Image (cartoon, grey):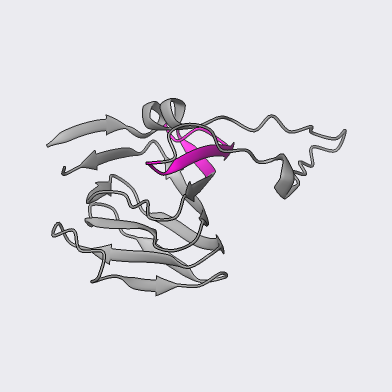
């Protein structure tokens, strides 16, 4: 079993959005200001708010290019996921099977309970999901 810090993965795979904060503390980020960097053969992560390695709330976006899936893994804390774009395919358990997944369309929500093994990804189209949680969080990959 391989233990990886979530932030370490995020730094390797993605960028951080640097948004302007107005004088009252409001933050606005337009969709076209969010960029995804890194290997398109893996989920690309962009940190939008907070720090998954620190105490407190964090929010990130993950982009899956067509055909890209994560491998079975779990997280140390609950994670709340909303589909922003595309149909996101989700599977549970440690037996990876793209054909044994549940499709979630834009606007759909899924909660990943702490310690529950899952995998997810895109089949025929780009998928973007928004992931929210309370840090610190650790991700454990089973493969």
Which residue sits at x=69%, y=29%?
A: 18
46 in magenta: yes
User: In the displayed structure, would residue 64 be above or below residue 1?
Assistant: below
The tally of labels here is 0
Q: Is residue 110 above or below residue 39?
A: below
Q: Position of residue 111 (x, y in %)?
A: 39, 63
Residue extent of the magenta highlight: 41-59
Residue 21 falls inside the magenta stretch = no
Front position in the image: 99 or 59: 99
Name the spot of residue 142 as percent of width and height, x first.
16, 44
**Residue 36 x/y as whole percent:** 56, 38
To which quarter of the image does residue 17 belong? Answer: top right
Residue 12 location (% of width, % of height) = 42, 26
Residue 22, picture quadrant: top right
- The answer to whether 84 appears left or right of 62 in the picture is right
Residue 94 in the figure: left or right of residue 52:
left
Is residue 130 shown above or below 102? above
Q: Which residue occupies the foreground of this view, 27 or 88? A: 88
- The single residue placed furthest to the right in the displayed view is 23
39 versus 85 height, above or below: above
User: Which quadrant is the N terminus positioned in?
Assistant: top left
Asked if residue 54 can be seen in this view, the reply is no
Residue drawn at x 39%, y 73% is: 103
Q: In the picture, which quadrant includes the C terminus? A: top left
> Image point 20% across, 63% down: which residue?
97
Using the image as rendered, state which of residue 8 and residue 133 is in the foreground.
8
Residue 74 visible in this rendered orientation of the protein: yes
């Amino acid at each position: 079993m391989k233990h990886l810090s979530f932030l370490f993965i995020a730094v390797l795979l993605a960028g951080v959005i640097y948004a302007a904060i107005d004088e009252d503390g409001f933050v606005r980020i337009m969709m076209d200001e969010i960029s995804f960097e890194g290997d398109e053969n893996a989920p690309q992560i962009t940190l939008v708010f907070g720090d998954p390695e620190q105490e407190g709330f964090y929010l990130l976006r993950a982009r899956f290019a067509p055909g890209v899936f994560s491998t079975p893994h779990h997280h140390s804390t609950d994670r709340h996921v909303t589909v922003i774009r595309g149909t996101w395919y989700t599977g549970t358990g440690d037996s990876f099977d793209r054909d044994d997944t549940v499709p979630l369309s834009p606007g759909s929500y899924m909660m990943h309970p702490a310690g529950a093994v899952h995998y997810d990804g895109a089949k025929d189209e780009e998928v973007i999901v928004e992931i929210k949680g309370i840090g610190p969080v650790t991700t454990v990959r089973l493969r």
